[in-house]
């Protein structure tokens, strides 16, 4: 089951309600992965003994966007081809809109830097044989055997056609974002993981959101029998006008397929209009359509009008959403619509507050 929550800042607003979901899912022993762009989930992570990961200029944890994991593959074959599609989405966030010719050249450079690490479009190149006393077992390549940002930076600099791209990578290799130029060193054992990307700053948040979404998605796919949840706070950054269709398509794919991996996706936003701002709102609509449960707290009239263009609401429900009081929401589950009130036990409130 997926939940898509559109929540205005009316207490117990999106942060409080999301923390309540996290707390109750914790008691159900579910794996939980949270993207935290506004540093809202630090305290509850500590109280529940979760793993708190910070990414930023002063952090000592790193995530390499070039990583390929054994669980990365979703189809029958094509590890590197699948990874390149995701990387082109990431670098369109960095470079801005790329023409088809520019995408082709970028793909060529990406293939080159993987080839230098012995990784080709043949899936078998990602495995190496390890001999032991019993059998010969294929071992998947480790994170320290993957390219890093500097490898692409140097490849772009060797071609006059990609010099402009190289310049835009300077902050990622030599400047304020150079924490992206490292081998991944993130590990965790707990079932609750919060990725704090607040220190990236407003303009760079989307890079961290996309990197961690990819990272967590691979973790989610490891075991289909384990129940798990991924929370994408401020999801509009990944499917709105500041994003691109490659990134947005990936987010949509998560919501479309996560159930078969035993998972749920929670998309959270407080601005409905941003959700429908890319490609005529196609990705926002797709997430809505693939979410079995939707929860709406009080919304302004402009957002209600936009929402009603993408989901069936009666005139009565439009009035009710506008006048919802503290702790009240409209719950939409399939074709069923019902007003709900969020009830919180005293011990839950103490943990969350």
Image (tube, rainbow, N blue to C red):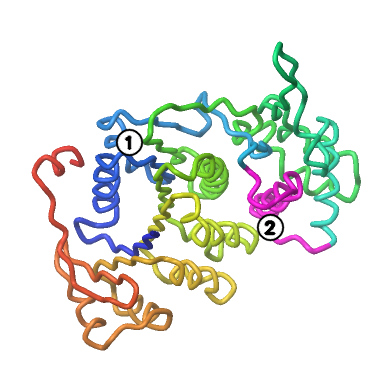
Image: 89 above or below 348: below
Question: Residue placed at 76% from the left, 43% from the top?
Answer: 167
Quadrant of the snapshot with the C terminus? top left
Residue visible at 55% across and 66% down in the picture: 241
The foreground one among 274 and 239 is 239
- Mark nearest the camera among 1 and 2 is 1
SS of the residue under disc 1 = helix
Residue at image point 75% right, 48% down? 78
- Check disc 1: other Cα within 10 Å, few if <14, some if 14-19, many if 20+: some
Q: Is the magenta stretch mostly helix, strand or loop?
A: helix
x, y percent for residue 169:
71, 41
Asked if residue 133 is among those painted magenta in the image, a careful observer would answer no
Q: Find residue 60 and report its horizontal and vertical position in percent.
A: 52, 23
Q: Which of marks 1 and 2 is nearer the N terminus?
A: 1
Residue highlighted by disc 2:
96
- Please name the residue that numbered disc 1 is placed on: 42
Image quarter (top left, top right, bottom left or bottom right) of the N terminus: bottom left
On screen, residue 73 versus residue 283, left or right, reads right
Q: Does the magenta stretch include residue 86?
A: yes
Report the span colored magenta. Answer: 72-100
Q: In which quarter of the image is residue 184?
A: top right
The reply, left or right, for residue 46 in relation to residue 167 is left
Q: Which of 182 and 168 is in front in this view?
A: 182
Above-or-below relation of 44 to 96: above
Residue located 34% across and 62% down the image: 5
Relative to the observer, which residue lies in front, 162 or 167? 162
Q: Residues within 10 Å of mark 2 (few under 14, many from 20)?
A: some
Horizontally, residue 27 falls left or right of residue 116, namely left
């Amino acid at each position: 089951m997926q939940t898509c929550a559109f929540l205005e800042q009316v207490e117990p607003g999106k942060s409080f309600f999301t923390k309540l979901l996290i707390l109750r899912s914790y008691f159900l022993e579910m794996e939980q992965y949270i993207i935290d762009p506004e540093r809202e989930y630090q305290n509850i992570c500590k109280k529940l003994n979760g793993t708190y990961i910070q990414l930023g200029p002063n952090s000592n944890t790193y995530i390499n966007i070039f990583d390929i994991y054994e669980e990365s593959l979703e189809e029958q074959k094509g590890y590197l081809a699948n990874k390149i599609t995701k990387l082109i989405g990431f670098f369109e966030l960095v470079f801005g809109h790329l023409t088809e010719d520019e995408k082709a050249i970028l793909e060529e450079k990406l293939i080159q830097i993987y080839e230098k690490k012995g990784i080709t479009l043949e899936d078998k190149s990602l495995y190496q044989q390890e001999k032991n006393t019993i059998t010969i077992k294929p071992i998947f390549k480790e994170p320290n055997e993957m390219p890093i940002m500097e490898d692409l930076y140097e490849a772009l600099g060797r071609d006059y056609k990609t010099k402009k791209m190289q310049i835009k990578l300077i902050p990622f290799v030599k400047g304020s974002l150079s924490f992206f130029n490292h081998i991944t060193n993130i590990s965790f054992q707990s079932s609750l993981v919060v990725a704090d990307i607040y220190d990236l700053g407003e303009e760079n948040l989307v890079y961290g959101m996309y990197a961690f979404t990819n990272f967590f998605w691979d973790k989610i796919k490891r075991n289909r029998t384990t129940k798990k949840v991924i929370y994408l706070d401020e999801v509009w950054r990944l499917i709105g006008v500041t994003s691109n269709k490659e990134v947005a398509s990936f987010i949509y794919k998560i919501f479309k397929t996560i159930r078969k991996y035993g998972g749920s996706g929670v998309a959270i936003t407080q601005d409905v209009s941003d959700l429908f701002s890319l490609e005529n709102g196609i990705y926002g609509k797709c997430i809505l359509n693939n979410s079995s449960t939707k929860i709406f707290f009080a919304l302004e009239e402009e957002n209600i009008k936009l929402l009603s263009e993408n989901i069936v609401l009666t005139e009565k429900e439009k009035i009710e959403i506008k006048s919802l009081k503290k702790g009240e929401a409209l719950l939409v589950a399939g074709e069923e619509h019902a007003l709900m009130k969020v009830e919180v036990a005293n011990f839950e409130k103490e943990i969350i507050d």
